[in-house]
């Protein structure tokens, strides 16, 4: 299994995988950025030079400085993404969960829009040969195949896609360099004066600013996919990627500048700068690159949900690890949700020009929330207050300006982005809120107070033996306490006699691959507690882990698991094991506020689609008893009734 050092080691293979997994989204932005900037109006020098200048400085400020240089430093044991960043700063302030959830929801919604717009933009190049070509079925088929491919893992995806993306970026760079070299005057757009002039004097600058933002929409993927490729590989490969992107933008700008007064009329300047003999090859390569572009957001979404489950702001879902390589994961349920979202976007908007209005708004929200969390992180790391204030002020001004521009797109398609984000955020909020409600009614008792009765009940033959070894999963963090409902289950809800009682606690650590356990003999040979410390990337197969612990303890003569039944003991047979999982239920009592009742109702509905407790902990269902216990029992003080 690769460790963190191997993950972050700079290598040719790592650079190639980075090209295939990380830069697909931002790397295909030249397909639609300038088409969106120019729009349906006549080409003008102000739009071309100002647009180019804005694109260059947006890539520099947002992608290079904010994400590649600064944000990539905030890794959580090698993992990246907005929820990993939240994990690093959550102790500073509880309210940070809200920007984390908003940013995470927006990022997931963006994963439903990125594949349709990139694939559509590439496939529509075929209309140069057949203007009436129906592209929607082609786009839907390509995206569907991509989602089928996800189950093989991003390591396989990266190795296959990496070489294609190298060809893609090289092609873009050469095409851009060739066109820009024919009109070198275009490089004066590197001067930020032209960007400022456009934003101040152009009558529709707010709309253009929203189009310019599309050039950096893949920046968050660089951070989300940190665990897949490593910081060093991302930073070095970005140098080559940015050079190729800038050259292509300036090549398109050179062509547009020489065609002032013309109207694009649906044509794409990305294809217009290609020689006629190369157009077919260009469309094929662009289509492959567009397929790969979708990968960055999809793999980032898998990482996002993995973190959300660990933070208890998303229902427990099945997470597969296609390989032992760190950072490689596949979430079947999210794969299906993203596919359905992509199909909806394609069917609603049909063409890429209609998707441009919906694109960018969601990821812009993620940018803002990342800035908030990153500001807290930098302050926590004791970076100079002046530098932290400079970072926060610069990026909040820039990103809120982009947000205002993108907000103007709401009526033109941005409503779908907001709708998808709101649905995801609603699920996160309900899961988080319901857990808070349940935890507020969870009561713990001092386990030592029950030592005498537990010692006696094991010998009380008037109570039928429930199991030889009775195992309870507990959420109590300390060995001195236990949930009152566990004691209620043992002593009152059909008393359960056992030869040995076991309390098993699972602590998920910030380390990815921790696998440790500790044993406490609370009552020798009668009550034993086991604490597992498992990394957030370790599959929680408690049945197997518990069996391994028992084997070790038997070898060390710490416990006797021989059956106490006379006949079975005569033949030295091992006693039976029974796991009891308490499903804590909050009843709809009058003690709950109306809003809490509504949240619990929605939570119970969502729980139907999540993994059960025994599945989440990897327990064998044939040895598990599920007990529903009420967390909130209605009292009788307020009940008015008279005996007659």
Image (cartoon, grey):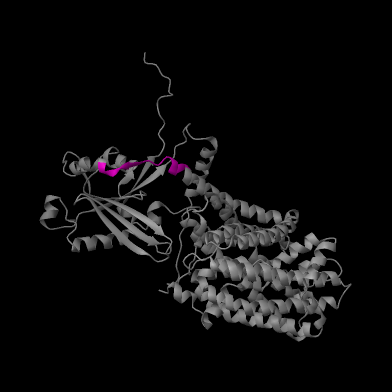
Task: Specify the farthest residue to the right.
Answer: 261
Q: Position of residue 157 (x, y in %)?
A: 53, 74
Q: Quadrant of the C terminus?
A: top left
Q: Position of residue 533 (x, y in %)?
A: 36, 60
Occupied quadrant, residue 293 = bottom right
| Residue closest to the eye, 432 or 567 | 432
Task: Specify the farthest residue to the left.
Answer: 570
Q: Position of residue 530 (x, y in %)?
A: 29, 55
| Residue closest to the eye, 83 or 472 | 83
| Residue closest to the eye, 333 or 129 | 333
Question: Position of 545 compared to 84: left or right?
Answer: left
Instruction: State the residue at coordinates (46%, 62%).
Output: 319
Say whether residue 128 is visible: no
Numbered marks: total: 0
Q: In the image, is residue 333 above or below residue 122?
A: above
Instruction: State the residue at coordinates (52%, 49%).
Output: 94
Q: Position of residue 198 (x, y in %)?
A: 82, 66
Say whether residue 443 is magenta: yes
Q: Quadrant of the N terminus?
A: bottom left
Question: Position of 13 compared to 190: left or right?
Answer: left
Occupied quadrant, residue 171 = bottom right
Question: Position of 564 compared to 621: left or right?
Answer: left
| Residue closest to the eye, 574 or 204 | 204
Say whether residue 545 is magenta: no
In the image, the segment drawn in magenta is 437-448
Occupied quadrant, residue 232 = bottom right
Say whether residue 68 is visible: yes
């Amino acid at each position: 299994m690769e460790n963190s050092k191997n993950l972050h080691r700079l290598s040719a293979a790592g650079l190639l995988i980075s090209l295939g997994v990380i830069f697909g989204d931002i790397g295909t932005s030249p397909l639609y950025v300038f088409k969106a900037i120019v729009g349906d109006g006549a080409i003008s020098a102000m739009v071309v030079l100002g647009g180019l200048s804005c694109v260059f400085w947006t890539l520099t400020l947002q992608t290079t400085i904010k994400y590649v240089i600064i944000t990539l430093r905030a890794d959580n044991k090698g993992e990246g993404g907005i929820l990993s960043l939240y994990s690093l700063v959550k102790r500073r302030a509880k309210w940070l969960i809200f920007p984390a959830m908003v940013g995470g929801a927006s990022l997931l919604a963006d994963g439903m829009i990125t594949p349709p717009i990139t694939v559509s933009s590439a496939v529509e190049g075929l209309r140069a040969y057949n203007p009436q070509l129906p592209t929607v079925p082609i786009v839907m088929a390509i995206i569907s195949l991509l989602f089928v491919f996800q189950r093989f893992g991003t390591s396989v995806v990266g190795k296959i896609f990496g070489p294609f993306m190298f060809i893609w970026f090289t092609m873009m760079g050469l095409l851009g360099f060739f066109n820009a070299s024919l009109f070198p005057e275009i490089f004066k757009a590197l001067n930020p004066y032209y960007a400022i002039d456009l934003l101040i004097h152009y009558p529709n600058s707010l709309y253009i600013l929203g189009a310019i933002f599309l050039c950096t929409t893949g920046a968050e993927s660089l951070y989300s996919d940190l665990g897949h490729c490593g910081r060093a590989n991302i930073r070095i490969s970005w140098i080559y990627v940015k050079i190729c992107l800038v050259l292509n933008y300036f090549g398109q700008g050179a062509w547009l500048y020489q065609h002032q007064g013309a109207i694009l009329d649906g044509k794409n300047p990305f294809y217009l700068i290609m020689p006629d003999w190369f157009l077919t090859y260009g469309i094929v390569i662009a289509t492959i690159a567009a397929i790969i572009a979708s990968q960055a957001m999809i793999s980032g979404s898998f990482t996002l949900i993995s973190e959300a489950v660990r933070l208890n702001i998303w229902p427990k879902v099945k997470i597969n690890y296609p390989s032992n390589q760190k950072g490689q994961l596949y979430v079947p349920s999210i794969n299906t949700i993203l596919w359905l979202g992509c199909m909806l976007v394609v069917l609603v908007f049909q063409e890429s020009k209609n998707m441009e209005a919906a694109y960018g708004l969601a990821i812009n929200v993620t940018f803002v929330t990342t800035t908030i969390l990153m500001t807290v992180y930098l302050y926590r790391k004791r970076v100079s207050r002046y530098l932290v204030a400079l970072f926060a002020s610069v990026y909040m001004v820039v990103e809120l300006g982009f947000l205002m521009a993108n907000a103007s797109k709401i009526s033109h398609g941005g409503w779908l982005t907001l709708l998808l984000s709101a649905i995801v955020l609603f699920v996160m909020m309900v899961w988080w809120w319901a857990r808070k409600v349940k935890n507020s009614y969870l009561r713990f008792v001092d386990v030592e107070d029950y030592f005498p009765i537990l010692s006696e009940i094991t010998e009380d033959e008037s109570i039928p033996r429930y199991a030889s070894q009775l195992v309870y999963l507990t959420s109590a963090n300390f060995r001195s306490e236990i949930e009152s409902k566990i004691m209620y289950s043992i002593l009152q809800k059909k008393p359960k006699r056992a030869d040995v009682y076991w309390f098993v606690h699972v602590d998920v650590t910030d380390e990815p691959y921790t696998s440790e356990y500790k044993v406490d003999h609370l009552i020798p040979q009668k009550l034993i507690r086991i604490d597992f410390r498992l990394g957030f990337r370790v599959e929680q197969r408690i049945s197997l882990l518990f069996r391994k612990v028992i084997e070790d303890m038997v070898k060390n003569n710490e416990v006797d698991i021989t059956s106490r039944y006379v006949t079975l003991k005569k033949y030295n047979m091992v006693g039976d094991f029974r796991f009891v999982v308490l499903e804590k239920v909050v009843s709809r009592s009058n003690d709950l506020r109306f809003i809490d009742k509504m949240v619990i109702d929605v939570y119970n509905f969502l729980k139907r689609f999540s993994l059960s407790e025994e599945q989440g902990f990897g327990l064998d269902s044939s040895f598990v008893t599920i007990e529903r216990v009420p967390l909130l029992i209605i009292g009788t003080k307020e009940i008015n009734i008279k005996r007659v």
